[in-house]
Image: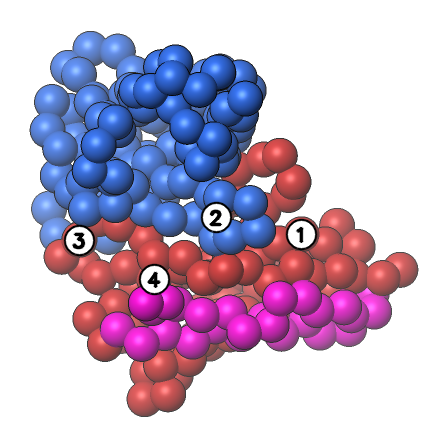
Chain colours: A blue, B red
Amino acid sequence: NAGVMQNPRHLVRRRGQEARLRCSPMKGHSHVYWYRQLPEEGLKFMVYLQKENIIDESGMPKERFSAEFPKEGPSILRIQQVVRGDSAAYFCASSPRTGGAIYEQYFGPGTRLTVT
Amino acid sequence: DQQVKQNSPSLSVQEGRISILNCDYTNSMFDYFLWYKKYPAEGPTFLISISSIKDKNEDGRFTVFLNKSAKHLSLHIVPSQPGDSAVYFCAASASNTGKLIFGQGTTLQVKP
């Protein structure tokens, strides 16, 4: 049973370029969450998605950041016109959460974005 | 506004002894709490969780205690092993949301 998959593991972008981070949830999980960890900090929630729906994007920066989880394929976190402050580790998590119940979230290995 | 706080950035214990990691929270809407362990360059690994209807949950060497009145939880690791050396994150969630709110982490070092 494969865990949460993220790719690429490392991504280097120049300022102004676009970054696309991909996440495939665990089999049977239909809920995906994105978190960001800045250096020397804890993980910060960014966005919560179900298939074809954004449930909560309260942690997403208002500009340049977007996320999707299409009916087919992985979830994508997209950062347009990257700046040095976007350099961080981006983690994806998934859970089988249904209804109002809470389930543990299982994390992928992360994508380390470096903006030069 | 730090809703989940881990006030000890680091902790060092001897192998075989007990490790106690602490976590405080401020939001009374939180009703589910989790501990994650993280190695460098890896994603967090789920360790143990507890619902607010309980005050203790045990899984092998790991026990989580919840004191709702004090808005405090702790993770006990007994006995501690060198392989437990990692960063431990406390996280909290409210049942009407999906997101986890994480503390800043505590780096545990278990010395042989």
Label 3 close to label 1 by CB (< 8 Å):
no
Going by the numbered disc 2, the residue's amino acid type is: Phe
Residue at horizontal 47 percent and vertical 43 percent from the top? A37
Residue at horizontal 20 percent and vertical 22 percent from the top? A68
B2 drawn magenta: yes
Other residues around mark 4 within 10 Å, as few (<14) / some (14–19) / many (≥20): many
- List the residue tagged with mark 2: B46
Other residues around mark 3 within 10 Å, as few (<14) / some (14–19) / many (≥20): some
What numbered label is drawn on residue B86?
A: 1
> Which chain is mark 2 on?
B
The answer to whether marks 4 and 2 sit on the same chain is yes
Q: Secondary structure at mark 4?
A: strand
Other residues around mark 2 within 10 Å, as few (<14) / some (14–19) / many (≥20): some
The answer to whether marks 4 and 1 sit on the same chain is yes
Of label 4 and label 3, which has the lower sequence position? 4
Q: CA distance from mark 4 to mark 1?
A: 20 Å
Compare residues A41 and B6 and report the one nearer the observer: A41
Going by the numbered disc 3, the residue's amino acid type is: Thr
Of label 2 and label 3, which has the lower sequence position? 2
Residue at horizontal 19 percent and vertical 46 percent from the top? A58
Q: CA distance from mark 4 to mark 3?
A: 11 Å
- List the residue tagged with mark 3: B97
Q: Which residues are magenta?
A: B1-27
Q: Secondary structure at mark 1?
A: strand
